[in-house]
């Protein structure tokens, strides 16, 4: 609508109710040339018109001052991303590439090297092959020539390479919360050594994880011989105290058990995820898979019974799986032990809480495969369940056929939880002057009720 058309409209006989024609006329006076409006509402710039425009066209230039639109947000985000990209434009200091004076014959940039080693976990080693680039390990695979892995690995071995590149690993010596030097450390430990030599090791404690290395064990024994009053404690958060106590209950001493799953026709797993966790799990998984493989018309597969408190990979592979509460597995083991004829075992008081026919069918299968069956208990079960498993293997004639007993692999087998409690008690009573921690993070992994962090504050020297 032009100015002339607006004047004609005002002079006409149209219904102009609701418009302030006087103010509109005043705005038109003095206007030269053509100007356009969408209607008298816009020309009059009434408040109702502005509200309707703001409601219908939120991006109208007449929006409220200070309001943030979606376009503004996107514009700021784009600017932030652009500024973040500028950080890559930092000029790095000039560095020179210096070649080897005598380059190693086998080290070629871009070509990996492999070396064989063993990865300990819980005191048990798994043979692995490590791929490295320019001296830096990058990938871990199983060693096909090592009996503990047979070329396979587990999730722990695959993730172990990440521990070599821990950004939180301390790069300096910390002395009383401040950065020190190696000479400061040697001076401090030298003074402590002289004091403990004078006192024959009184007040000296050593805390390690499970030690199976003969070299480290020999060094620790030599240290204890030099400081006869010192004490050596061991602790791991996922230790095998129950398995050790079960062996002591069954045999009167600590022993290590090795199973031959490739020779077993019937297997009972009592809350034991032997395919994925525990000593020898990588080898056990390979042996179990070999026994489940049908190789000819006359070959048969083993049968697996899994009684567990939560679903595991072993339970998923089981032919028969019975979910039970963890506290009920002990009574279940007693019922099975009574069924296979273990001497001195009485049936549980309430056998009806187990499915009818389950125990009877299991006992028949185990007895039908005497000498070729296995009963294995998991580390989360108490020592009594492990002792019952050993007793059932003995009663079924599995000892020396599918279950073998050896000397303990630990250099100093003990109840680690009781050992840690003894250490905390000594620290709280002020009987510990120097504590040497070799490996592990006991402040983080120890049970909360021990309050190890507060007990450590009472130790004069913590290494």
Image: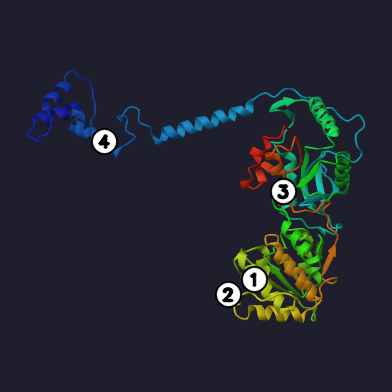
Report if the CB atoms under discs 1 and 2 are less than 8 Å apart. yes
Q: Which of marks 3 and 4 is nearer the N terminus?
A: 4
Q: Which residue is drawn at 68% across and 73% down?
A: 334
Q: How many numbered markers are drawn?
A: 4
Q: What residue is pinned by disc 2?
A: 353
- Mark 1 neighbour density, 10 Å: few (under 14) some (14–19) many (20 or more): some
Q: Mark 1 points at which residue?
A: 331
Residue linked to disc 3: 159
In this rendered view, identify the residue nearer to me: 187 or 192: 192
Q: How far apart are marks 1 and 2 (CA)?
A: 10 Å
Asked which colour scheme the image uses, the reply is: rainbow
* Label 2: which secondary element: helix
Callout 2 touching callout 3 (CB < 8 Å) = no
User: Which quadrant does the N terminus fall into?
Assistant: top left
Residue 391 is situated, as x and y percent measured from the top left of the image, at 77, 71
The quadrant holding residue 258 is: bottom right
- SS at mark 1 in the image: helix
- Identified at 67% across, 63% down, the residue is 313
């Amino acid at each position: 609508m032009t100015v002339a058309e607006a004047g004609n409209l005002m002079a006409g006989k149209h219904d102009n109710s609701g418009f302030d024609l006087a103010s509109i006329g005043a705005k038109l006076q003095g206007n030269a040339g053509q100007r356009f409006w969408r209607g008298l509402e816009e020309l009059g710039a009434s408040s109702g018109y502005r509200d309707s425009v703001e409601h219908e066209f939120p991006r109208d230039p007449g929006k409220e001052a200070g309001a943030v639109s979606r376009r503004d947000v996107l514009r700021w985000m784009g600017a932030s991303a652009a500024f973040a990209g500028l950080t890559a434009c930092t000029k790095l200091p000039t560095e020179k590439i210096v070649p080897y004076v005598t380059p190693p014959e086998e080290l070629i940039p871009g070509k990996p090297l492999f070396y064989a080693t063993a990865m300990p976990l819980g005191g048990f080693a798994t043979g692995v092959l490590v791929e490295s680039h320019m001296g830096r390990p990058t990938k871990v695979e199983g060693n096909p020539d090592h009996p503990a892995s047979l070329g396979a690995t587990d999730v722990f071995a695959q993730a172990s390479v990440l521990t070599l590149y821990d950004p939180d690993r301390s790069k300096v010596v910390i002395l009383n919360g401040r950065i020190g030097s190696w000479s400061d450390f040697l001076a401090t430990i030298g003074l402590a050594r002289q004091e403990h030599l004078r006192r024959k090791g009184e007040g000296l404690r050593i805390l390690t994880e499970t030690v199976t290395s003969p070299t480290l064990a020999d060094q620790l024994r030599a240290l204890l011989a030099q400081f006869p009053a010192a004490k050596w404690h061991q602790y791991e958060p996922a230790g095998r105290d129950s398995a050790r106590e079960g062996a002591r209950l069954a045999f009167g001493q600590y022993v290590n058990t090795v199973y031959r799953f490739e020779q077993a026709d019937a297997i009972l797993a009592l809350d034991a995820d032997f395919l994925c966790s525990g000593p020898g799990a990588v080898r056990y998984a390979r042996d179990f898979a070999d026994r489940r493989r049908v190789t000819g018309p006359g070959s048969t597969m083993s049968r697996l019974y899994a009684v567990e408190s939560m679903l595991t990979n072993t339970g998923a592979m089981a032919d028969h799986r019975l979910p039970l509460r963890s506290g009920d597995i002990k009574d279940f083991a007693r019922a099975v032990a009574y069924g296979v004829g273990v001497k001195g075992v009485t049936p549980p008081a309430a056998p009806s809480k187990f499915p009818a026919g389950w125990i009877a069918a299991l006992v028949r299968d185990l007895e039908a495969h005497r000498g070729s069956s296995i009963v294995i208990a998991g580390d989360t079960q108490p020592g009594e369940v492990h002792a019952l498993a050993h007793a059932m293997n003995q009663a079924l004639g599995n000892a020396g056929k599918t279950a073998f007993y050896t000397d303990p692999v630990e250099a100093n087998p003990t109840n680690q939880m009781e050992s840690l409690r003894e250490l905390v008690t000594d620290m709280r009573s002020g009987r510990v002057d120097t504590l040497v921690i070799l490996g592990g993070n006991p402040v983080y992994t120890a049970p909360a009720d021990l309050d190890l962090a507060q007990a450590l504050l009472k130790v004069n020297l913590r290494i």
